[in-house]
């Protein structure tokens, strides 16, 4: 009796089953169907082994029972083919009515095929230790099981974009192994490979997809980020109500030991976290966990327990340790699990207070705010790809030369209808998602191209001022990128003046100074923009190698509205001029204001008194008529 292959198959399946049961399951559709498939394959291999034993031991005395057992094995083979198809469906249609329609239709087909197999005759052959079955029942089994396999392959290929890409590949691999074994056994009836090949395919699925460790963090034992995404998708597909909380720590440690400390905190959190009914905990990062609450009736009590637990643990870690919370009471306020993840990440980014009492509850207004910024982010991406980013120029007047000698380049964006989008609406989004680097390069390249193409120096322009954001100032490759663009357009670097802000010099001073050094060696000049806002510290002028200081609009307007502001501005002007630097006064709107600034010996005037920011063509017309 040659049942070694079947015994190996059973050992593989039982080992996987016992290992799988050691872990707490998220009860995902694919996890449930894998367990059903595993159990179905185990029954199939057992039936295969029992049928061989029955042929060897019982054929002469109990032929009817042997025939029934053999047909039961054939029916189980077709069942495994059906379960393999439903396993793939559980990924494509998880939690949807379509999946259960597939279950009903597949079960009906299987029952009909089982009836056909039960009614058809079967032949049993025994030659020494070699036994096998043949005849119409066996042929129909090959046809029915093969039909499920072929249909599963077609279904997987058709829905490969909807399903997990790796799952589709593994399913196709399993089907190929099983189909190959069936073909070999069909040509050589004595080679009983189907059961073992099926078990081998299940092993491939287990190691590539269904190993519970793939959804578990090894340090803490909590579910990981992949587990969160799969579980949240299941809840949304099942339309089950749930709440969500994120907790993150700010340990107040240096970067050198921050990672190890965060790991220790997370491990302690996982060990001491009280068991909460209908609650799943996920480690999202070394300093952050998310908790999903399905018990909406007692969710407030549960949230309070978690807050007390975290606060208690925070005190044990020392006074520098801090924790912050974001709580979404109803996950249905967002459309799907992807938007849910984006919302919680957005809430953390928006939260500036990391104190222990920081508890932010997400409401519908916050969701709408996130959606607007997300839509703006998408609009900005499209505008950059479709060349809907423009540069407007606001002329700057020299009080000494009595003409316009420069202009400030200001970024503008148009929507698909050609309407201008307010700069404040998209610049902050670009700074938040890092797109400001790409946006800044687009503006810089357009300015260089415009200056060289139109030869703006012939209109008396000495340079164009271009703003640098805080993010750009902290970008180490800024100098290399901008020098490359200037070389591309063969522009004299003296025609470029880059504007930095006080906040930029604070946030990334070392990187900024290195970029400034390289660009100044190349020939570029710098201005300190928006002097009069933020820190307003004259030390910045001393520290930064700038040529021009710009008084922002608020400071310029305050000069005409507040006597104290006059003294402050006069003192600042005297000190700046004493350092041999030039001054630009922004926001000048009337002739009276212009004359006052001129009397103060302000070097340059910028504002609506002369012109609002103009697109390229209008700016050229302005220069031609005024110079």
Image: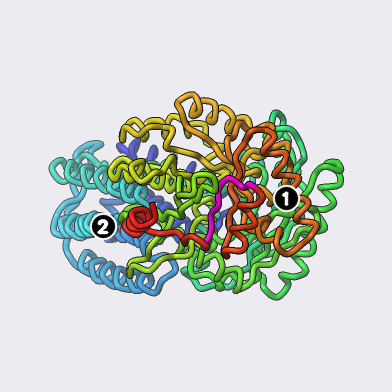
Q: Identify which residue is drawn at 33% across, 70% down.
A: 417
Q: Identify which residue is drawn at 74% across, 57% down.
A: 275
- In the image, taking residue 11 as reference, residue 367 lies left or right, namely right
**Counting other residues with Cα less than 10 Å from the Cα at mark 1, is it few (<14), some (14-19), or many (20 or more)?**
some
Label 1's element?
helix
Residue 569 shows which numbered tag? 1
Label 2's element?
helix
105 or 549: nearer the viewer:
549
On screen, residue 264 above or below 354? above
- Most common secondary structure along the magenta stretch: loop
Task: Identify the mark nearer the N-term, 1 or 2.
Answer: 2
Residue 535 shows which numbered tag? none
Q: Identify which residue is drawn at 34% across, 49% down.
A: 165
- For the N terminus, give its image quadrant: top left
Magenta region: which residues? 601-608
Disc 1 versus disc 2: distance between alpha carbons? Answer: 78 Å
Q: Residue 47, how many percent across, how many down?
A: 35, 52
From this viewpoint, is residue 172 visible? yes
**Counting other residues with Cα less than 10 Å from the Cα at mark 2, is it few (<14), some (14-19), or many (20 or more)?**
many
- In the image, taking residue 181 as reference, residue 310 lies left or right, namely right
Q: Which picture quadrant has residue 522?
A: top left
Q: Which picture quadrant has residue 91?
A: bottom left
Q: Identify which residue is drawn at 44% across, 38% down.
A: 496
The residue that disc 2 covers is 152
């Amino acid at each position: 009796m040659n049942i070694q292959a079947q015994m190996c198959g059973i050992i593989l399946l039982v080992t996987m089953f016992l290992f799988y049961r050691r872990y707490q399951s998220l009860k995902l559709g694919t996890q449930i169907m894998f367990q059903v498939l595993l159990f179905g394959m185990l029954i199939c291999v057992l039936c295969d082994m029992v049928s061989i034993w029955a042929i060897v031991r019982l054929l002469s005395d109990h032929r009817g029972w042997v025939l029934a057992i053999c047909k039961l094995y054939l029916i189980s083979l077709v069942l495994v083919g059906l379960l393999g198809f439903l396993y793939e469906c559980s990924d494509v249609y998880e939690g949807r009515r379509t999946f259960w329609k597939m279950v009903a239709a597949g079960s009906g087909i299987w029952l009909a095929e089982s009836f056909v197999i039960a009614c058809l005759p079967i032949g049993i052959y025994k030659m020494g230790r070699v036994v096998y079955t043949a005849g119409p029942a066996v042929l129909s089994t090959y046809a029915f099981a093969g039909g499920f396999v072929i249909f599963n392959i077609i279904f997987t290929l058709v829905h490969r974009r909807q399903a997990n890409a790796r799952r589709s590949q593994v399913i196709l691999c399993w089907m190929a192994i099983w189909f190959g074994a069936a073909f070999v056994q069909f040509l050589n009836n004595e080679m009983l490979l189907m059961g073992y090949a099926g078990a081998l395919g299940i092993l491939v699925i287990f190691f590539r997809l269904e190993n519970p460790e793939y959804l578990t963090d090894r340090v803490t034992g909590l579910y990981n980020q992949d587990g969160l995404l799969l579980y949240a998708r299941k809840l949304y597909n099942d339309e089950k109500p749930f709440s969500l909380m994120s907790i993150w720590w700010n340990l107040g440690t240096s970067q050198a030991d921050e990672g190890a400390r965060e790991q220790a905190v997370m491990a302690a959190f996982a060990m001491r976290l009280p068991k909460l009914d209908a609650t799943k905990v996920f480690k999202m990062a070394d300093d952050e966990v998310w908790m999903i609450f399905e018990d909406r009736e007692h969710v407030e009590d549960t949230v309070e327990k978690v807050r007390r637990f975290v606060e208690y643990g925070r005190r044990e870690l020392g006074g520098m340790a801090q924790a912050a919370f974001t709580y979404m009471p109803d996950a249905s306020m967002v459309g799907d699990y992807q938007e849910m993840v984006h919302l919680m990440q957005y809430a953390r980014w928006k939260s500036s207070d990391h104190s222990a009492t920081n508890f932010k509850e997400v409401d519908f207004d916050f969701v709408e705010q996130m959606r607007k910024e997300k839509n703006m982010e998408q609009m900005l991406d499209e505008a950059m790809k479709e060349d809907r980013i423009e540069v407007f120029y606001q002329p700057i007047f020299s009080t000494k030369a009595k003409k316009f000698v420069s202009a400030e380049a200001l970024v503008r964006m148009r929507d698909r209808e050609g309407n201008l989008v307010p700069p404040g609406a998209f610049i902050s989004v670009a700074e938040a998602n890092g797109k400001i680097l790409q946006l800044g390069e687009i503006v810089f390249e357009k300015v260089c191209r415009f200056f060289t193409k139109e030869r703006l120096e012939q209109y008396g322009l000495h340079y164009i001022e271009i703003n640098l954001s805080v993010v750009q100032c902290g970008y180490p490759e800024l100098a290399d990128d901008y020098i490359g663009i200037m070389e591309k357009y063969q522009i004299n670097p003296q025609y470029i003046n880059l504007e930095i802000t006080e906040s930029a010099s604070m946030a990334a001073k070392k990187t900024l100074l290195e970029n400034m050094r390289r660009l100044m060696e190349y020939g570029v000049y710098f201005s300190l923009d928006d002097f009069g806002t933020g820190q307003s510290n004259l030390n910045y002028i001393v520290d930064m190698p700038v040529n021009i200081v710009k008084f922002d609009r608020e400071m310029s307007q305050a000069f005409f509205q507040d006597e104290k502001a006059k003294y402050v501005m006069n003192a600042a002007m005297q000190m700046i001029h004493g350092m041999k630097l030039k001054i630009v006064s922004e926001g000048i709107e009337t002739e009276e204001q212009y004359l006052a600034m001129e009397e103060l010996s302000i070097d340059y005037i910028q504002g609506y008194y002369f012109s609002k920011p103009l697109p390229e063509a209008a700016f050229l017309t302005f220069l031609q008529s005024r110079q």
